[in-house]
Image (spheres, helix red, strand yellow):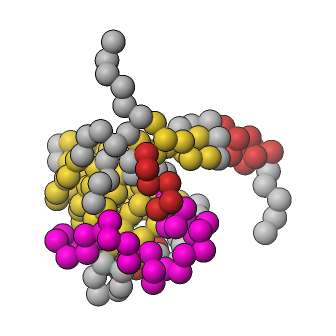
Amino acid sequence: MSEPTRTQSDFRAAMANLSAAVNVVTTDGPCGRAGMTVSAACSVTDSPPTLLVCVNRSSRSHAVLVGNGRLCVNVLAGEHEDLARHFAGAAKVPPAERFTDARWDLTGYGVPVLRGAAAAVLGRIRGRRELGSHSVLFVDVEQVRTQDGGGALVYFQRRFHSLGTRPAA
């Protein structure tokens, strides 16, 4: 792999200063079960409810996710840093063992849903656009679950940070 250009290095440094919610995107279906940690997920519109999720095409989960066509964006709460690391591959947890934790609902929705997630947004991939190393997936939202009080897990300056909730002044 070649050295990054100056613009690429500067861009990476700038993106390290862009706080992002941490999510575990999960899927299950005829192509198998898979999950990955992503920070590039956001709303597109609420009419109709649509998300976009950016996934590196070199990820071993990419083909499974696209092949199944259904997914859940599990928005992680503050206490889920261990799961973020597992699904990013940083904890060396084998893919086959990532869903053995009792925190996962594997039967109620057709895809793995994290119990206790700040939000779980389930949907079907409507479209895909490939750009550079990633696929941008457009997801039609079918179902949403939310839970208050668990704070949020964000990624900032190449580290995870837990954000708590506090009452408005």
Task: Give the answer, above or below, for where 18 lies relative to 121.
Answer: above
Q: Nearer the viewer, residue 161 or 72?
A: 161
* Residue at point 43%, 45% (across, down): 78
Task: Give the answer, above or below, for where 124 lies relative to 145.
Answer: below
Numbered circles on residues, count: 0
**Could you tell whether 13 is left or right of 4 in the image?**
left
Q: Quadrant of residue 157?
A: top right
**Could you tell whether 44 is left or right of 84 in the image?**
left
Quadrant housing the C terminus: top left
Q: Nearer the viewer, residue 129 or 107?
A: 107
* Residue at point 53%, 38% (across, down): 19
Asked if residue 103 shows in the view, the reply is: yes
Q: Which residues are magenta?
A: 84-112
Task: Give the answer, above or below, for where 136 lies relative to 166.
Answer: below
Instruction: Decide whether the magenta segment is chiefly helix, strand or loop.
Output: loop
Residue 99 picture location, percent across and down: 38, 75
Asked if residue 58 shows in the view, the reply is: no
Residue 151 picture location, percent across and down: 38, 39
Residue at the far top: name it.
Answer: 169
Residue 23 picture location, percent across and down: 42, 55
* Residue at point 23%, 62% (across, down): 123
